[in-house]
Image (spheres, grey):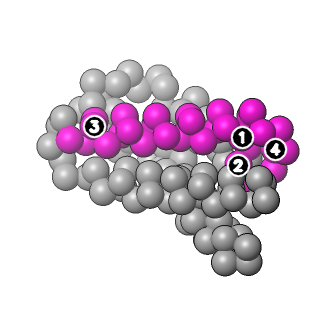
Amino acid sequence: MKTTKIIYYVSTGLLTLLMLFSAGMYFFNHAEVASMFSNFGYPTYIIYPYAIAKILGLVALWFVVNKTIKEWAYAGFFFAFIFAFFAHIMISDGEQMGAILAMILLITSYITNKKITNG
């Protein structure tokens, strides 16, 4: 159980750093992110709401006790990472490794969280 908790905190911590870096880019390097979103064919007006959603998802993972909300946060991140992976594949920019890393961290966090909360 102790090893499971360590794996949970490490994976969730690294995922948190990755998402905070991403959200920070959305807020503080808006021009570059807007260019990337335009290349994906995404509207640029979703950049700030998306950054806020990432931060709220992290809050749910770390601080919300309600299991349903936590599940929704994990699901939201799951779909975001899937879409990011395929968006990078579709424009052939070679940047899909960030989405793969995020997905690995997310799945590891999810599985270990389930083991901890279900005994």
Residue 93 locus on image (x, y percent):
18, 47
Marks 2 and 1 sit apart, C-alpha to C-alpha, by: 6 Å
C-alpha gap between disc 1 and disc 3: 25 Å
Q: CA distance from mark 4 to mark 3?
A: 30 Å
Q: Amino acid at mark 1?
A: Lys
- How far apart marks 1 and 4 lie (CA) works out to 7 Å
93 in the magenta segment = no
Q: Is residue 55 at least partly visible in the picture?
A: yes
| Residue at image location 36% in from the left, 54% down from the top | 100
Neighbours of disc 2 within 10 Å: few (<14), some (14-19), many (20+) = many
Q: Which residue is mark 2?
A: 61
Q: Which element carries disc 2, helix, strand or loop?
A: helix
Q: Residue at 17% x, 37% y: name it.
A: 91
In the image, the segment drawn in magenta is: 60-89
**Mark 3 vs mark 2, CA separation in Å:** 24 Å
> How packed is label 1: few (under 14 Cα within 10 Å), some, or many (20 or more)?
many
- Mark 1 touches mark 4? (CB < 8 Å): yes
- The answer to which of marks 4 and 3 sits earlier in the sequence is 4
Name which quarter of the figure residue 92 lies in.
top left
Residue 14 percent location from the top left of the image: 56, 65
Q: Name the chief secondary structure element in magenta.
A: helix
Residue bearing the label numbered 3 = 86
Q: Position of residue 11 (x, y in %)?
A: 57, 65
Q: Nearer the viewer, residue 55 or 2?
A: 2
Foreground pick, 117 / 72: 117
The C terminus lies in quadrant: bottom right
Q: SS of the residue at dot 1?
A: helix
